[in-house]
Amino acid sequence: MSSPKKYNQNVHPSTEVQHLKTIEEQSGNLYKSLYIISRRSNQIGAQIRQELHSKLDEFASSQDNLEEVVENREQIEISRYYERLPKATLLAMDEFKNGKIYFREKDEE
């Protein structure tokens, strides 16, 4: 499992205007490029979600007390950290633009 710090490097956390021609150049087709980016975004989102849940489970309360809501500082800090990370779509777009995504076409028979 990869570290969330890997995802936090050099990606601006807000959206930016993208030139469609540069996105299209990677695969030769704009829609294919967007499909590749969306698939990678889903992968990144699933990885980050899994990491978040595993870290939150470490600090989970073992008591099943429904009357009291226990405020766990560690869980709150971890959640805030993950909320500040760039969105999975922005990370996937950055990987695609920098040529870090490997993709191949299925052979049509």
Image (cartoon, rainbow, N blue to C red):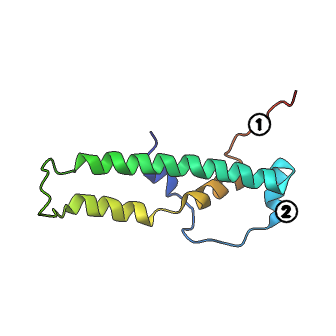
Residue 82: % across, % down: 40, 60
Q: Is residue 98 in view? A: no
Other residues around mark 2 within 10 Å, as few (<14) / some (14–19) / many (≥20) = few
Q: Is residue 9 left or right of residue 37?
A: left
- Give the residue at mark 2: 21
Q: Is residue 73 in view? A: yes
Residue 44: % across, % down: 54, 49
- Give the residue at mark 1: 104
Q: Residue at 57% of width from left, 67% of height from top?
A: 12
Secondary structure of the residue carrying tag 1 is: loop
Residue 36: % across, % down: 71, 48
Front label number (2 vs 1): 1
The kind of residue on which mark 1 rests is Arg
Q: Is residue 101 left or right of residue 26?
A: left
The label on residue 87 is none
Q: Residue at 81% of width from left, 60% of height from top?
A: 22
Give the position of the N terminus as an image quadrant.
top left
